[in-house]
Amino acid sequence: MVRLGVRQLPSTACRGLGPACLLLLATVLAACQAPVGASPAMTASPAATTPGPAPTPTSAATTPTPTRGSAAHVFVYFAHPDLGDVCEQVFPVARAVERADPTAALTQLLAGPTEIERALGYQSWFSTGTAGLLRTVSLSSGVATVDLGDISRVIPNASSSCGSHALLGALDATLRQFPSITRACYAIEGEMDRFYGWLQYDTCRP
């Protein structure tokens, strides 16, 4: 398998060519990382979304479409200053996974942008420091309940107005690519009040 390094995809590679070029490079990355023997690709077609406690798609963006037919894929959502307001919009990046479900999608999201994605300009509160903090994901009547480890200790500054919008927007958009999920509630170590108190929001009610 050919490995793509950051030096092969510098941050200036798409200078002057617009958002479509950045998203195309992200698609190439996802295709090259596809695992062998994974299940068939999912058919979700997400667009850029506006973050908030209950974000909804507001502006179209060229979605990176996986091209390697033998892999399952999910989309994770990150901010990008060249594509939209980093406080108000997140954009999809395709990731190859063994199983396309909410747990796999959130696991990928919490790991943050890859080195190449960061070189392309994608930004997120999530990083290697938050990788592995997903505890459980449950679904009931369209509501996903996500229990996390103590994420507030890793990224304490996310409680700002911009930070909380961006963080919740990335989480919500990543979950809402699945038609069975209409909204989501989050907890830290089983406590919803703790999660929403950290972000200075009213507690979610499943």
Image: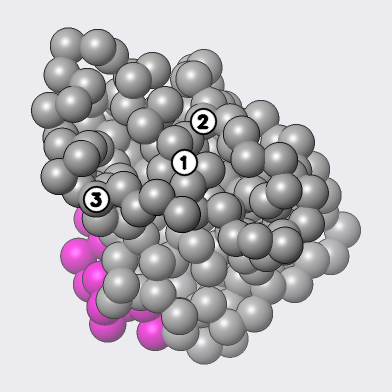
Provide residue 14's location: percent of width, then percent of height. 22, 22
Q: Give yes or no for residue 167 being in the magenta stretch.
A: no
Q: Is residue 154 visible?
A: yes
In the rendered image, residue 144, in percent from the top left (x then y), is placed at 71, 62
104 or 31: which is nearer to us?
Answer: 31
Name above or below for residue 6 compared with residue 17: below
Can residue 51 be seen here?
no
Q: Amino acid at mark 3?
A: Gly
C-alpha gap between disc 1 and disc 3: 18 Å
Quadrant of the rendered image containing residue 138:
bottom right
Q: Is residue 96 left or right of residue 8?
A: right
- Left or right of 68 on screen, residue 107: left
Query: Residue 87 location, x and y as percent?
Result: 29, 38
Q: What is the span of residues highlighted in magenta in the rendered image?
A: 150-165
Residue occupying image coordinates x 15% and y 35% = 11
Mark toward the start of the polypeptide (2 vs 1): 2
Q: Which residue is mark 1?
A: 93
Name the mark on residue 64: 2
Q: What sort of colour scheme is used for the picture?
A: one colour
Picture quarter containing residue 66? top right
Name the residue that disc number 3 marks.
Answer: 5
Helix, strand or loop at mark 2:
loop
Name the residue nearer the viewer: 98 or 156: 98
Q: How many residues crowd around disc 2 within 10 Å: few (fewer than 14), some, or many (20 or more)?
A: many
What is the C-alpha distance between the residues marked 2 and 1? Answer: 6 Å
The residue drawn where x is 62% and y is 49% is 74
